[in-house]
Amino acid sequence: MEGILLTQVSTPIIGQAAWLLGKIMDGIYRVMDGVFGVQNLGVCIILLTIIIYTLMIPLTIRQQKFSKMSAAMNPEIQKVSQKYKGKKDQASMQKMQEETQLIYQKYGVSPTGGCLSMFIQFPFLWAMWYVIRGVPAYVSQVKDVYAPLISGIMASDGWQKIMEGIGKAKPILMDPSRYDYTKTNTLIDVLYKFQTTTWDTLIDKFPSLETTIESTMKQLEHMNNFLGLNIAESPWNLMKTSFASGAIIIGILALLVPILSGLTQYLSIKLMPAASTGNDQNNQMASTMKTMNLTMPLFSVFMCFTLPTGLGLYWIVSAVVRTIQQIVINRHLAKVPMEKLIEQNMEKAAKKREKKGVNAKNINEMAQKNVRNIKEPAKNIESDKAKEEKIAAAKRANANAKAGSLASKANMVKQFNEDSKK
């Protein structure tokens, strides 16, 4: 089996997104190195994050517009839900769907409007995680740093058993039964997970390669150093080694990574426009969202302690960028009247219909034409004649009514009224 990092993620859509982001990351590194002489993966992660979220601004604006619309629509949707509450028959359910759809049409939005933006963003945000987790798989210059050391290791006697022993232990945990240690990519995957103590172990196992190992370590430390932190190591490991060696400042900086990750994500979530859902206390969805908004930042703090610091840096930067975007977008949308947003949505909906070949004018004309084409039901001449014959027969029967019957008395009253009028 190939290495998990250098064998780039092949999941459909996410794999393609990771390939694209990897190319951008590689390009950023080359420009920073060639133009500015900066070989720093932390800076590259920051720049890549800013670029990605800048490109996603149109989707972010669309999502926040939908959230603002939802705040206005949801009270009306709640009224419709209450109107048909407890009614499970097909006719009532269909009527409720129709009335709900009319509300969406009134505001010029689609029920899936908010989900679509998130669906488009998701593959790229998930792909970012793969790229940062497996930098050597996407940045060729980082992969090249390992080449001399890999050659030296594979030229040593008994190297495979030694590397398998190192790889199956902590912090690598790559079981030889699952990974092929004869592959170069697998060895680079193993080395990419090395921490300070693991490099010391490698020197003990390959003393003849001490110079090459130290040279590789220095190059990687130079690339991965960001504000004194090695972004390839976890904050937890950095805290343990720095506090043990007396480097208190490094330990504090490492501790700040997960804390800042949680705080910035919480702030970003708080600034997101929340859609009104009626009575939140009785609304299960609102309760679930509140729980997620609290647990996600806490989960981020927990994960940041054990994952590479580079991922924590990405989460911090992405949350800061989102926060700035949301502040700017929220201020802009606050100045736009709801009527203007509805008008814009209606115009976009009309353009979509025109692309499909039917515009609003055609729809109106077709509706009027259909109304004109509705014909009055043809009169049944035969039934009219039958009715006239029945009336005539009834008159004859009344004229020949027997004395003392109701019909004869009715004739007497009729005759009396006629005589009175003369």
Image (cartoon, rainbow, N blue to C red):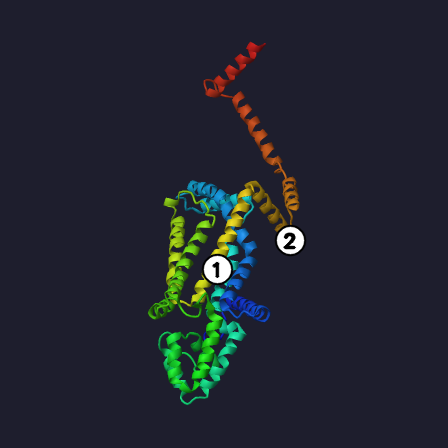
Residue at 64% from the left image edge and 53% from the top image edge: 355
Question: Residue 339 lies in what quarter of the image?
Answer: top right
Eyeballing the image, is 253 above or below 279? below
Quick check: 368 left or right of 163?
Answer: right
Q: Which residue is mark 2?
A: 355
Q: Amino acid at mark 2?
A: Lys
Q: Which residue is mark 1?
A: 317
Q: State which quarter of the image contains the N terminus.
A: bottom left
Distance of label 1 from label 2 (alpha carbons): 39 Å
**Foreground: 378 or 346?**
346
Do we see residue 111 in this rendering? no
Which of labels 1 and 2 is toward the front? 1
Q: Position of residue 365 (x, y in %)?
A: 66, 43
Find residue 127 and report its horizontal and vertical position in percent. Answer: 50, 65
Q: Amino acid at mark 1?
A: Val
- Under circle 1, the secondary element is helix
Assign the C terminus to one quadrant of the image. Answer: top right
